[in-house]
């Protein structure tokens, strides 16, 4: 049953699904769609061309669908799409896309955006992603499924974090991180693999072992150019689905990829 607190303001034109609970002092704009089973706890602001999928819960003082923080935005009808069954906590901000970035910001299903986190314009956040408190994603970032970004991290615009990445707190992420990587240090060094995260997802032991061998060959050896090591990994271990994701990620790189700074050189980049 639809329940709208009398202090809430829902603009004409907004589409509100069944069994939605809109709490005190929420404000919903005319181009917003809130699908079935969502809950807006209180003081939530939804603006722009924003769609919130089924079962998502949004906590007080979150602001979704505000204009992108970009000097290139001039009021174009861009979008924000938030997936199903997300938990969006207090003071979270997620901005619309820009025309130059594809026109849409997306957050996948089952995401957990903790208090004060920010998703910038044109970001593509996958499913089952966690952004801990005060984490900031610059514009155009791509965050793979099952990635966890620790508290107070700052992810530079256009950076890609692959599937299953674990990022420790207080990192400044300036480079792409391979799928299943473990990132730590205040400047965001790749220090290994997110083995615990892989085990929690029941990824087979054979795949974990293949990833360990691939990682060692890619990042713990400097005897040949990185591109040659990448191609050797593809040849030796490319039949494994996890390794295949890493190889595809590296081949798609358009900006520097994070290496293991304990061993790799900052100039040893994919070609």
Image (spheres, rainbow, N blue to C red):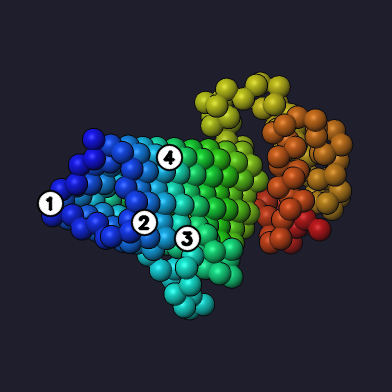
Residue marked by disc 1: 6
Q: Quadrant of the N terminus?
A: top left
Residue 197, picture quadrant: top right
Q: Position of residue 39 (x, y in %)?
A: 28, 42
**Residue 252 appears in view:** yes
Is residue 265 toward the left or the right of residue 111 in the image? right
Give the mark nearer the N terminus: 1 vs 2.
Answer: 1
Label 2 element class: loop
Dot 2 surroundings within 10 Å: few (below 14), some, or many (20 or more)? many
Label 4 element class: loop
Residue at 42% over, 52% down: 51
Q: Quadrant of the C terminus?
A: bottom right
Is residue 96 toward the left or the right of residue 30 in the image? right
For discs 4 and 1, the disc positioned in front in the rendered view: 1
Give the mark nearer the N terminus: 2 vs 3.
Answer: 2
Residue marked by disc 3: 79
Q: Is residue 246 above or below residue 152?
A: above
Q: Farthest residue toward the front? A: 13
Q: Position of residue 260 (x, y in %)?
A: 66, 48
User: What's the CA distance linking mark 4 and mark 1?
Assistant: 26 Å
Residue marked by disc 2: 32
Label 3 element class: strand
Dot label at residue 84: 4
Of residues 34 and 118, the one drawn nearer to the viewer in this rendering: 34
Give the mark nearer the N terminus: 4 vs 2.
Answer: 2
Dot 1 surroundings within 10 Å: few (below 14), some, or many (20 or more)? few
Labels 1 & 3 near each other (Cβ < 8 A): no
User: What's the CA distance linking mark 4 and mark 3?
Assistant: 16 Å
């Amino acid at each position: 049953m639809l329940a709208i607190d009398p202090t809430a303001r829902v603009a004409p034109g907004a589409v509100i699904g069944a069994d939605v609970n809109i709490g005190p002092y929420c404000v919903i704009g005319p181009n917003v769609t809130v699908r079935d089973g969502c809950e807006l706890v209180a003081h939530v602001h939804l603006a722009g061309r924003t769609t919130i999928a089924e079962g998502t819960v949004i906590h007080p003082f979150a602001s979704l669908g505000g204009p992108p923080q970009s000097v290139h935005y001039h009021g174009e009808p861009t979008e924000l799409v938030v997936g199903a069954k997300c938990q969006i906590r207090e003071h979270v901000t997620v901005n619309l896309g820009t025309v130059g970035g594809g026109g849409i910001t997306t957050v996948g299903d089952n995401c957990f955006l903790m208090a004060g986190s920010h998703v910038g314009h044109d970001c593509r956040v996958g499913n089952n992603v966690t952004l801990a408190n005060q984490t900031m994603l610059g514009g155009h970032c791509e965050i793979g499924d099952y990635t966890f970004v620790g508290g107070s991290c700052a992810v530079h615009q256009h950076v890609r974090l692959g599937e299953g990445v674990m990022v420790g707190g207080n990192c400044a992420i300036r480079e792409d991180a391979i799928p299943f990587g473990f990132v730590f240090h205040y400047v965001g060094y790749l220090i290994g693999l997110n083995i615990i995260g892989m085990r929690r997802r029941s990824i087979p032991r054979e795949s974990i072992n293949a990833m360990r061998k691939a990682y060692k060959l890619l990042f713990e050896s400097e005897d040949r150019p990185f591109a040659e090591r990448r191609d050797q990994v593809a040849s030796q271990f490319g039949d494994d689905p996890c390794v295949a994701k890493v190889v595809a990620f590296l081949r798609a790189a358009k900006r520097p990829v994070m290496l293991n700074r304990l061993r790799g050189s900052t100039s040893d980049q994919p070609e």
